[in-house]
Structure formats: C-alpha cells, structure tokens
C-alpha cells in the first residue's frame, strides 16, 4: 500500500508538474505574442513619428523659402516704387525750377521795360520842367544804386507795377 500510495503521489506530482509546465508554456507564449505585438506597434508609431517629423521639416523649409521669395518681391517692389517716387519728385522739382526761372526772366524783362518807360517819362517831364531835370539825375543815380544793391526790393516793386489800371500785364508806353 505504501508503494501504491507512492506511485499515486508520484503520478499526481507528475501530472501537476506537466499541467504547470503546460500553463507556464502557455503564459510564456502568450507573453511573447503580446511583446511582439507591442514591439510592432512601437515600430509603427516610431515610423509614423519619423514620417511626420520629415513632413514637418519639409513644410517648414517650403514655408521659409516662400517667405524669402515674398520678402524679396516686396523689397524689389518697394525699391521700384521708391525709385518711381524719386524720379517723379526730381522731374517735378526740375519743372518747377524751369517755371520759376522763366518767371524770373519775364519779371526781369518787364522790369527793364518799366525802367525804359521811366527813362522816357523822365525825358518828357524834363522837357516840361527844366528845374525837375536837374533833380532827376541825382535821384536816378540813387535809384540805380538801390537796384544794384537789393534785387528783391526791385522785384517786389516790379510786381506791383506789372498790372495796369486796365488789368493787363503789358507795360504802358509813353504815348498814353
């Protein structure tokens, strides 16, 4: 009986051992399957992250290149506009300068005409009043000195004398 009991216990121990080994094998196989699946998911996530990173880097490079191109275009457009404004201003200044020079020449011509008329009037007055002729040359000399010293004063006087009573800019002749 003891031998039968030993045999039964050995068989039970062997069956328990085999069952434990089978369960352990199943657990190891199940763990290995899960680990392989986790490794595959990790590789997939890593590949997706690398692809996303590469796509983001490519997009950033493209955006940077577009920004540089746009900046260059805006800079060249601003330079062209500045050049256009500069040329327009230069042309306008030159036109105004020519206009002012023409106006000064016209005023000088009118002044010369008025001075000639004043000389004629002096000669006419001198024929009527011989005493006035003696004082007129000294006054005439003083006027010539003033004209030589201060051009702005005479141009202001000429401007006032330019318009006649009839509204024209033409100098009056001595025959009136």
Image (cartoon, rainbow, N blue to C red):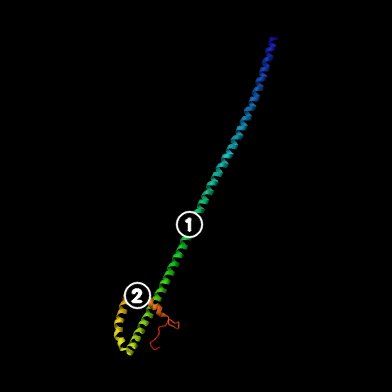
Label 2 and label 1: CA atoms lie apart by 54 Å
The quarter of the picture where the C terminus appears is: bottom left
* Label 2 Cα crowd, 10 Å radius (few <14 / some 14-19 / many 20+): few
- Name the one closer to the observer, 148 or 138: 138
Which mark is on residue 8? Answer: none
Residue nearer the viewer, 129 or 20: 129
Q: Nearer the viewer, residue 12 or 155?
A: 155
Q: Which residue is disc 1 drawn over?
A: 72
- Between marks 2 and 1 in the image, the one whose residue lies nearer the viewer: 2
Residue depicted at x 44% and y 69% = 92
Query: Which quadrant: the N terminus?
Result: top right
Element at badge 2? helix
Residue found at the far bottom of this picture: 128
Question: Mark 2 = which residue?
Answer: 151
Which of the 4 quarters of the picture holds residue 114?
bottom left
User: In the image, what residue occupies the spot 42% across and 71% down?
Assistant: 96
Q: Position of residue 169 (x, y in %)?
A: 43, 81
At a point 37% along the width and 80% down the height, the residue shown is 111
Q: Nearer the viewer, residue 79 or 120?
A: 120
Q: Residues within 10 Å of mark 1 (few under 14, many from 20)?
A: few
């Amino acid at each position: 009986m003891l031998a039968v009991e030993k045999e039964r216990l050995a068989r039970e121990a062997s069956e328990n051992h085999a069952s434990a080994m089978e369960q352990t094998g199943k657990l190891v196989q199940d763990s290995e399957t899960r680990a392989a699946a986790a490794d595959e998911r990790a590789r997939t996530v890593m590949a997706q992250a690398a692809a996303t990173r590469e796509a983001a880097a490519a997009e950033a490079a493209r955006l940077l290149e577009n920004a540089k191109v746009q900046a260059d275009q805006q800079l060249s457009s601003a330079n062209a506009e500045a050049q256009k404004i500069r040329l327009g201003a230069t042309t306008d200044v030159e036109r105004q300068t020519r206009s002012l020079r023409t106006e000064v020449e016209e005023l000088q011509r009118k002044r010369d005409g008025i001075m000639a008329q004043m000389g004629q009037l002096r000669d006419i007055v001198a024929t009527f009043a011989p005493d006035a002729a003696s004082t007129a040359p000294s006054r005439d000399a003083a006027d010539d000195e003033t004209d030589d010293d201060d051009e702005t004063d005479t141009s202001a006087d000429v401007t006032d004398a330019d318009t006649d009573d009839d509204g024209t800019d033409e100098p009056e002749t001595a025959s009136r």
